[in-house]
Amino acid sequence: MNKYEIMLIVKTTTAEEEVKEVVSSLKSIITKMKGKIIDEKEMGRKELAYPIKKEVSGFYFVFNCEANPEAIAEFDRKAGLNENIIRHLIIRLDEE
């Protein structure tokens, strides 16, 4: 399994319960496919450097996880389809 860092920006117009639901559903994709979340940070609401999809701020979340490439591909697909996610980024961490 590879190590990844995942960053999500969720719309600020989304209700708080729905934000938690969106994030937990995306995390469950990784855990259901035998991956594990190592570290999780909720960075709160931040202003964006430039508007993305007509949004000027968003709720930031960062996860470090271990997962197989299939789980990450599914995560990427679902995050791209979710209308509450403004932007997501997946970085594979180098092995030391």
Image (cartoon, rainbow, N blue to C red):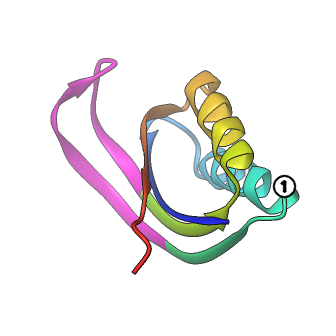
Per the image, is 55 magenta? yes
Q: Secondary structure at mark 1?
A: loop
Would residue 35 appear left or right of 52 to someone viewing this image? right
Pinpoint residue 10: horizontal percent, then vertical percent: 47, 42
Point out residue 38 in the picture as x, y percentages from the top left corner.
Answer: 60, 79
Residue at image position (63%, 52%) is 23
The boundaries of the magenta stretch are 41-60
Residue 30 location, quadrant = bottom right
Residue 64 in the image: above or below residue 21: below
Q: Specify the quadrant of the image occupied by residue 66.
A: bottom right
Residue in view at x 44 percent, y 62 percent: 62
User: With respect to residue 11, does 59 lie above or below?
Assistant: below
Residue 58, by quadrant, is: top left
Tell me the crowding category of disc 1: few under 14, some 14 to 19, or many 20 or more residues within 10 angstroms, Cα based: some
Q: Which residue is mark 1?
A: 33
Residue sitting nearer the eye, 66 or 96: 96
Residue at the far left in the pictured view: 49
Residue 88 image point, x, y percent: 44, 40
The quarter of the image holding the N terminus is: bottom right
